[in-house]
Image: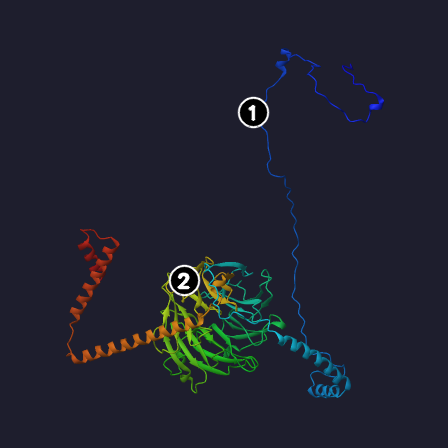
Amino acid sequence: MEIKYEYSRKRSEFGRPCSFSDLLAEVTVDIPPDPSLADDFIPQDPVDFGVQEGPLMAVHEVNTERTQVSSRGVNHVEGGWPKHIDPKNSELTSRYREEVEREEVYTKTIQRLGFVMEHYIRQNNTIDIYEEYFEEEEEEEEEEEHPSAKTINVIRDPNTPKRMATHLSWHPDSNRAVAVAYCSLDFQDSRKDMNSDSYIWDLEKPYSPELTLKPSSPVVTLEYNSKDWHHVLGGCYNGQIVYWDTRKGGLPMEMTPVEFSHRDPVYGACWLTSRTGTECFSGSTDGQVLWWDIRKMSQPSERLVLDITRQDQLKDALGAISLDFAPVLPTKFLVGTEQGIIISCNRDAKTPPEKIANIFRSHIGAVYKVTRNPFFPKVFLSVGDWTARIWTEELNDSSSIMETKYHTSYLLDTCWSPMKPAVFFTARSDGTLDIWDFLFHQKEPSLSLKVSNDPLLSLSSQDNGRIIACGTRQGTVSLLEISPGLCTLRKNEKTLTSSMFEREARREKVLQEKYRERLLREQEQLRAQPEEQEDPQQVFKQAQADFLSSIKAERRRRGLEGPGEDEEGEAAAQETA
């Protein structure tokens, strides 16, 4: 290797910082181009350069195993007694209390604790930390939020083929669980692989049921006992009544004998407010309402035939397809029938015919649901055919005081909001949930939400009115959370709703009186006119002319009739007539 240039420095200068100075440019090496080497070069075309603006990220996937959580509880009973004292024996416990109270240590302890408690009670009474200082000032009106709802959970039937979610019942303890009755109500649906189980679902674990209820026949309706949370009442498809104790598993505790049960499916079963909390009653399309006591289910304790002619004949009875019982009216209940009639019954009447108090001719088709208003028990709501109607028991044998518009699809279920007196929910056969607030809108729902493509068969609201459960024909239960404006009671809302119901009741009463007056005038006019024998042939010709004129008017409205089609259409209509 040839050294072209050598840098030299004294040894004493090693390690010192370098000091540079500006000098003129100097060419040390000059390599001239060689044209003979140009043939060896290959030009690169095109030239691509990749530029990454964002930071480089790494993707890592972890598949974790699902933890199976089981619910365990502790049943705390009275304790702290000595071993020789039985807490269930009242004589031993009272004798032991007397012995303890005679001891000197007990007296001194009570005096010492009493002094401490008195000090803290006086301290609490010194100032009221919950005192409102500005009660008279009006609250600032909050901005009206747009009504909305969102799906927070979906519970599906774990079996195949899928069955209908026919009824929903919330657990009375903070609505932590929901009982769902699964049954196929299709006519003569006798598939061999059809499962008959129903389930209780824990909302925190929607992927597997908390308890499987195993009845002898598919359950159409399920109801929790509000007094004893562990008892669940069920009405079966074969007419039997069955109840479960959830502490003892999914097998029925007892069921009614087939010979003393209903002859048709049980569409309604309700617990009664009794001292023991063991009484219930049921209704079926066989035209009977039966009362039961779960302590003795060998036969019904009472029976009522839904014969509106009050002859107590089972052959003339109307089939019950919905029941409603309100604890605030312990002797009254409502029955919705297949024939579109609502029957108000009074259990305290002496004879069975007298138990049928009032009759409301409500809908064209079956009354799928009837329910009382939780704030005004004399006002109740019903759904059937294409409308929902509001009634009052103060007007007998009259039409409804309020009603919704006619929908294009059937209405299959409804329920009131437990928090707002004028809000109720309706379920339609096209899978739409409608939320109505009659204080603000009476012609259109405040919110319409497409929940499913399948018909909605059942509805149930939590006690706080925030969560709505909707059951579909395919066994899917959707839990919807609605906006706070639809479940928060506003100032004076209860008074305004009461005034609205009273106003509509007065209006309906005035219309009813005017209608009766018009009927009386028409009857008097008929009596004053001499009787004339109408010619049947003339009546037929007049009816035919009216029929043809209505057809032509309808064709003109649709734009189907041209200038030369008048005679042809009339001839065709005459042939049809």
Q: Which residue is at the front of the view, 521 or 363?
A: 521
| Residue where numbered disc 1 is placed | 46
At label 1, the amino acid type is: Pro
Q: Residues under labels 1 and 2: Cα distance?
A: 66 Å
Please tell me which residue lies in front, 148 or 145: 145
Q: Height in image: 319 above or below 312? A: above
Q: How many marks?
A: 2
- In this figure, which residue is indicated by the disc labeled 2? 445
Residue type indicated by callout 2: Pro
Taking the image as drawn, is residue 549 in sight?
Answer: yes
Going by the image, does 525 lie left or right of 432?
left
Residue visible at 43% across and 85% down?
349
Badge 1 marks a residue whose secondary structure is: loop
Residue, x 56% and y 77% (percent of image)? 227
Q: Residue 323, percent across and down?
A: 46, 74
- Up/down of 7 relative to 459, above or below: above
